[in-house]
Image (tube, helix red, strand yellow):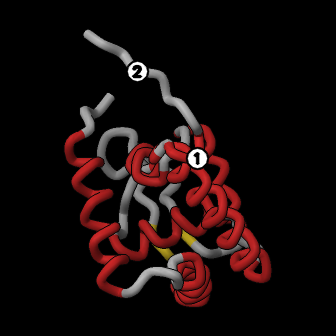
Amino acid sequence: MDQEPVGELELSVGYVLKQVHASLRSAMDVALRPLDLTVPQYACLELLGQSSGLSNSELARRAFVTRQSMNLVLRRLQERGLLTRPDQAPHGRALPSMLTRDGQAVLRRASTAVRTAEKQAFAPLSPEQQLRLRRDLAACVASTPSS
C-alpha cells in the first residue's frame, strides 16, 4: 500500500477541522462562562434535555468524555440543583439523571448562548453551505469505523 505523508498542515482537512473545533470550543467557553458552566456541563444538560434518564456511561459516551470525568460533571450539576439522580439504581447499576426545573431554565439560556456562538463561527458560510458542510461531515462520520 502506498502511504502518503500529511504534507502542509494548512492543506490538511483534519488540521483545519481541529482549528475549527478549537475556535468553536473557545467561543463556547466564553458564552457559557456567565452561566458558570463548562462545555462538558453544557453538553450533559443538552443531552439530558433531549433524552432524560441517561446514565453516566451513556452521557460520557455521547459527550466524548470519560466516565470518571462525567461523574464529576454530574456531581457538580447535582450540587447546583440542576439535575437529580437516585441514590440507588432502579435497575442494574445505572443511575438515570434528570434535569430539574432550574436545570431546564439554565439549559435554555446556555443553549441560546451556544447557538449564538455557533452562528458567529459559521457566519462566513451561507445557510446552504452550512447545510452542505453538515451533510458532508456527517457522511465522513458515518463512513469512519467505530473503535
Q: State which quarter of the image contains the N terminus.
A: top left
Residue under numbered circle 1? 10
Q: Is residue 145 left or right of residue 118?
A: left
Q: Quadrant of residue 107?
A: bottom right
Question: Which quadrant: the C terminus?
Answer: top left
Q: Which mark is residue 4?
A: 2
Could you tell which of marks 2 and 1 lies nearer the N-terminus? 2
How far is disc 2 from disc 1 in space, using C-alphas?
Answer: 16 Å
Residue occupying image coordinates x 65% and y 71%: 28
| Residue drawn at (55%, 70%) of the image | 83
Q: Secondary structure at mark 1?
A: helix
Do the residues under discs 2 and 1 have CB atoms within 8 angstroms? Answer: no
Query: Could you tell me which residue is drawn at 59 percent across and 83 percent down?
Result: 120
Residue 20 appears left or right of 127? right
Whether residue 133 sits left or right of residue 57 in the image: it is left
Give the farthest residue toward the top.
1
